[in-house]
Amino acid sequence: DKYKQVDEFIRLMDQSISSDLATQKDISVVDLGCGHAYLTFAVAEFLQSKYQKVSVLGVDERIDSKEHNEKVASKLGVSANFVAAKIADLSSYAVDIAIALHACDTATDDAIAWAVSGGAKLLLIAPCCQHDLQTQMNNVPEPWNLLTKHGLMKERLGDLMTDALRAQILKLLGYRTEVIEFIGGEHTPRNIMIRAV
């Protein structure tokens, strides 16, 4: 399932690289909340054939992930760097593409904020759990309380509201934004992607 998610993520990235990004000689990518860096490694390898210089950084707050990813990168000969830091604490800088595959809860918001402040030209964000808004859904007016009586429905409503707000904020900040299903639900129930150019 993870392989299929990464494969589809790469396919969508290829489709999403606009003409100005496609004509650059160099490209920079930051994978925010990279975990064990499956996507980071795939992106680094995919872009090698398209650009003269590819700069890929994987960010995860866990030190053990950083160490693991550095060993794998060295073993595979993949040119990627890793840093152990919370996304919100990472210094902002200019980047061409920002990606996040299932950065949990508000880490997705941190990824979006970081990418926007760095002027990312392309954001590909596949959100994970969105608990922050769900915890605020207590006194819900009619008829919406029908959706919040049941835990599963409340969770899905919170997910949809959160991702709709994320997409709208990106649109207000000048990005051409769409929310798409990036992979079939049989591979992961977290199959929405926010794509912003």
Image: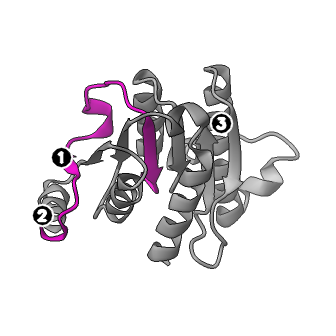
Magenta stretch bounds: 75-103
Q: Comparing marks 2 and 3, which lies closer to the viewer?
A: 2
Q: Which mark is residue 84?
A: 1
| Picture coordinates of residue 14, whole percent (x, y) | 55, 53
> How far separated are the C-alphas under marks 1 and 2?
17 Å
Task: Tell me the residue that label 3 is attached to.
Answer: 167
Expressed as whole percent of the image width and height from the top left, the position of residue 150 reads 71, 63
In this rendering, would 91 be left or right of 189?
A: left
Upstream in sequence: badge 2 or badge 3: 2
Measure the C-alpha gap from mark 2 to mark 3.
37 Å
Q: Of the residues shown, which amino acid type is indicated by label 1?
A: Ala
The answer to which image quadrant residue 149 occupies is bottom right
Q: Is residue 155 magenta?
A: no
3D distance between C-alphas at marks 1 and 3: 27 Å
Q: Is residue 106 visible?
A: no
- Density class for disc 2 (Cα within 10 Å; few <14, some 14-19, many ≥20) is few
Q: In the image, is residue 73 above or below residue 62?
A: below
Q: Which mark is residue 74?
A: 2
Who comes first in sequence, dot 1 or dot 2? 2
Left or right: where does residue 86 sit relative to residue 9?
left
Q: Position of residue 71 (x, y in %)?
A: 11, 65
The picture quadrant where one finds residue 63 is bottom left
Between 23 and 45, the one lying in front of the other is 23
